[in-house]
Amino acid sequence: MTTMSAKHRNTLPPYRAVLAGVAAAFLNAATASADGPLNNTLVLPNHEALPAMNHGAQTAVWGLQLRIGDTRVYRIQSNGSVDVDYGVIAATLSNGLGGTPAGTADASRRVAAQYEIQGDLHYRVVGKDNGGFLLAARLQNALVHVDGVVDPRRDLLEQPFLIRVAPSGALRSFEFVRGFPADLGRVIRGVVEPLQLVFPKAASGSWVAQENAVGGAYDARYSGAMGGANPAQLQKTKTRIYGVPMADAKGLPAGAATRIGKANATITLDPTAGTVETITASEDTTTDANGAFISSHVGDYSAERVKMAIAALPTTAQDAARALEGDDVARARLYEVNPRIAPRVAGLTVEGMLAVFDAELAKNQASAHLLLKSWLRLNPTKSLAMARELEARPGGGESAAAVVGFAALSAAGHPEAQAALIEILGGAKTTATMQERALMAILDVAMPEPALLKAVWSFRSTIVADDAAASVMQSLATNVYGALGDAQRGNASVTQEVLHRLSSLLASATDSRQAVLALDALTNVGDYALVAPIVRSSLSSKDAAVRTAAFVTFRRMTGEAAFTEFGQRFAAEVDPAVRREAARVALEMPESAARTAWAKAQLTGAAETDVLVTAVRILGRELGAQPENALALRALLDVSRDRQVRREVYAFVAPRSEGGQ
């Protein structure tokens, strides 16, 4: 689900936030195997150990050694068990966001499952990217077992994908073919990420690196010698977890934290060839909040480099990018129905499906969503009739039937389902809450048709924002329109149409509010090359609110060029309030050399406490990969008397002893 801008979220009424949150947490996080066995709500875990690709020996060249053209194959085996209480998440969403407390049916939904994953990971280094490397990869002989049942989507598991690797060895991102199922993306990340091995810049016998994984960031401590023995051996231990190891878990209780019972890995390397030979890892972690259980994971992982013919992979970065283009996978997904689910819904009328849906909804919302989505894919021409039935349910857009039902319409995804959402959105008698429900469903449509874009823009254009409720609706519609153009969806024609409309809105805005709406929506497009030329003039606006919104558009932009421009604009900004909000955007932007340099510059050039705190957090969170940041943080302690700033520094570096050591 695309995330709305913070500015827009803050304007939403509580019930809308609750519905959106439940849709995200219950229907996405709770159904990581959404097309797997019914009632199987396994969230495949982060294996807590992270990728070693091809690394150098301390006696030769320290750190990551990848060369364009390198190929590797690793045989991977992962197995374990997870235990998740989704009721805790649901109750927090409802109670914490001002909605009705979760019903008794969802008060305790603790699900345990066993999993086993195996396959051969093939990759080839095909290019360089921002100082790092671009790897074309794919799994072969892939099998996923959940409670003994084989996931039938092996053809999807073996689709090609890309991995972007930082110079340190840290994984920057994964890119999959368009329409690739999110749950299978997490499976692939889960078997690749435990291979990660992150080096500091200088050779060392032990070091700590901060690494990213499916469920969040963590600190890993490395120890062991790389010189001399062949094979060399490293030990890796996860020491602190920043994120909860549950994919896409939204709305977790305040104070949620993961306790590490065990999270260790042993890595063997060939120090002369610079290759990882084997990795074995095991973990035992538990997540809770104030004593309330949320989830646990116990698992083992192994990877062994093997010699076999490399799979069919691109040989250049351009070919790798083209391998992800096309709509074949996405289109096939619009009508795919799991053969284990089809018999339960095949042949049902609208009334019959509603009876099945209602019965399942009372027991398990995730299962109800899966059943209705499957029925809609089998019966596309009945989409509008089903949408009308859901609209007529008591409670309208706030009812559980509407939340789950319209999410199923969105997931069904085909043109007929989109047409049904358009009819509901533009209906003369459609209530405001149902319009919001339709918009939130449209937000998650994977392959929006031109008619859907036109309908959302037309709806937005008819709203007269003469009161608070209408202003919220206009903001929501504008943001949804921008999200449909998200460049990461891979639909260039849709993105260009969205950019054209939003740039026209920005250029013609007669008041700051309309300009801010356009900028907020452009944030959801995310691509620096496409968005930056449109928003540059707004960074020089006389209106502080417009300048702030223009800075926010950088939040999802990646690459050195994006942050370099951000830093230049920040240096020219004089308004303390705008600088404060812009600094917060910097904290959310991806790690880059330009961001690190900017943060260090703020330690000596910035006077505002908020900016200094942000700079400290950026440098502190990078300490694992860039231990030299500690020198800059300690230098700040020598000159700053600000208690808040000093307290923030001490969160990352220990106070000096009396002897100055």
Image: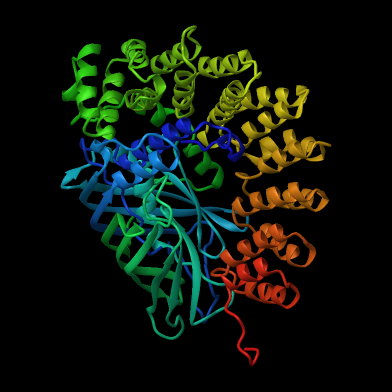
Q: Quadrant of residue 607?
A: bottom right
154 to the left or right of 523: left
Residue 591 vertical placement versus 260 (above, below) = above
Residue 105 vertical placement versus 436 (above, below) = below
Residue drawn at point x = 65 percent, y = 66 percent: 644
Count of all numbered marks drawn on residues in the image: 0
Q: Quadrant of residue 77?
A: bottom left
- Measured as percent of width and height from the top left, residue 9 is found at 55, 36
Q: Is residue 159 visible?
A: no
- State the residue in front, 332 or 354: 354
Residue 389 vertical placement versus 101 (above, below) = above
500 to the left or right of 423: right
Residue drawn at point x = 58 percent, y = 77 percent: 202
Q: Is residue 455 visible?
A: yes
Residue drawn at point x = 35 percent, y = 28 percent: 333
Hey, which residue is sitting farthest top in the picture? Answer: 428
- Measured as percent of width and height from the top left, residue 487 is found at 57, 35
158 to the left or right of 218: left
- Measured as percent of width and height from the top left, residue 344 is found at 17, 24
Of the 4 image quadrants, the one containing the C terminus is: bottom right
- State the residue in front, 461 or 317: 461
Residue 380 vertical placement versus 15 (above, below) = above
